[in-house]
Image (cartoon, helix red, strand yellow):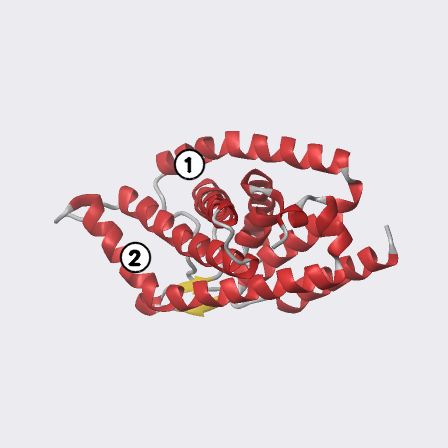
Amino acid sequence: MSKKEKILLKAAIAFALMFAVTPVANAMHIMEGYLPAAFCVAWGVICIPFLAAGLISLKKRLKENRKSITLIAMAGAFIFVISSLKIPSVAGSCSHMTGTGLGAILFGPSAVSVLGVIVLLFQAVLLAHGGLTTLGANTFSMAVAGPLLSFGIYKLCSKCKMNRKVSVFLAACLGDIFTYCVTSIQLAIAYPSESGGAAASAVKFLGVFAPTQLSLAVIEGILTVVIVIGLESYARPELKAIGFLKEAR
């Protein structure tokens, strides 16, 4: 590992440690015991193929380029940090950014599913943020659905030859919003409204988080652009090694 890589890795770890400890709150991660057992099992099973694909993807990437572990660690630390920072929302709940858009842009959505489940597991155990029984549901919304959309948006923008910074912003911002849409649907399916069913319930859940989440999504998009600019300035060889700069514009 080169001196520059060691500095990047140490900076990522230090950043994570500075902001990892946050107050306990009812956050957008679905909390422990909130979902019926059948739903917990179902979402966990749905996540298995994505996690398997993610492990294969990471193993292949590390085999091809061992040095990419530095950027992988940085992406994981970024997810851990900003998804641990919880902002009060209405109805006594909280919202937070996801951080998964950056990893999806750099490594693809399957790799991020593994990073996401690791982050969610640590947050559930150490920060009481989310839960073990709801790990499958939280993994699907934050580490599978959100990254898939972020990756798709970024690739679409690239094909349209859109400015890279704009592409990164849209991918991270829309991926964050989509995560919350999926979580609202998950909650609505588990607890449909007596009047209007799951659709009406989903609208209510979305209304709880929209006031803070829309602004947080914009902030996440900006932060992700800043991180990418920093990487392009100080880790250009590493970005070329993972193929990120092949589409340079």
Question: Which three-letter amino acid code belongs to the residue tagged 1?
Answer: Trp
Instruction: Name the residue: 30% across, 57% down.
Output: 206
Report the front residue among 223 and 92.
Answer: 223
Task: Report x, y in % for residue 93.
Answer: 37, 64
Q: Note whether residue 121 is visible.
A: no
Left or right for 200, reference 129? left
Q: Note whether residue 79 is visible.
A: yes
Left or right for 95, reference 225? left
Question: Which three-letter amino acid code belongs to the residue tagged 2?
Answer: Leu
Instruction: Name the residue: 44% across, 50% down.
Output: 32
Task: Report x, y in % for residue 12.
Answer: 71, 61
Identify the residue position indicated by label 2 in the image: 206
Compute the Cα span from label 1 to label 2. 20 Å
Mark 2 lies on a secondary structure that is helix
Instruction: Name the residue: 33% across, 51% down.
Output: 184
Task: Report x, y in % for residue 202.
Answer: 26, 50
Left or right for 125, reference 173? right
Report the front residue among 13 and 21.
Answer: 13
In the displayed structure, would residue 48 be above or below residue 145? above
Task: Report x, y in % for residue 25.
Answer: 45, 64
Circle nearer the N terminus (1, 2):
1
| Quadrant of residue 224 within the rendered picture | bottom right
The disc at residue 43 is 1
In the displayed structure, would residue 47 be above or below residue 192? above
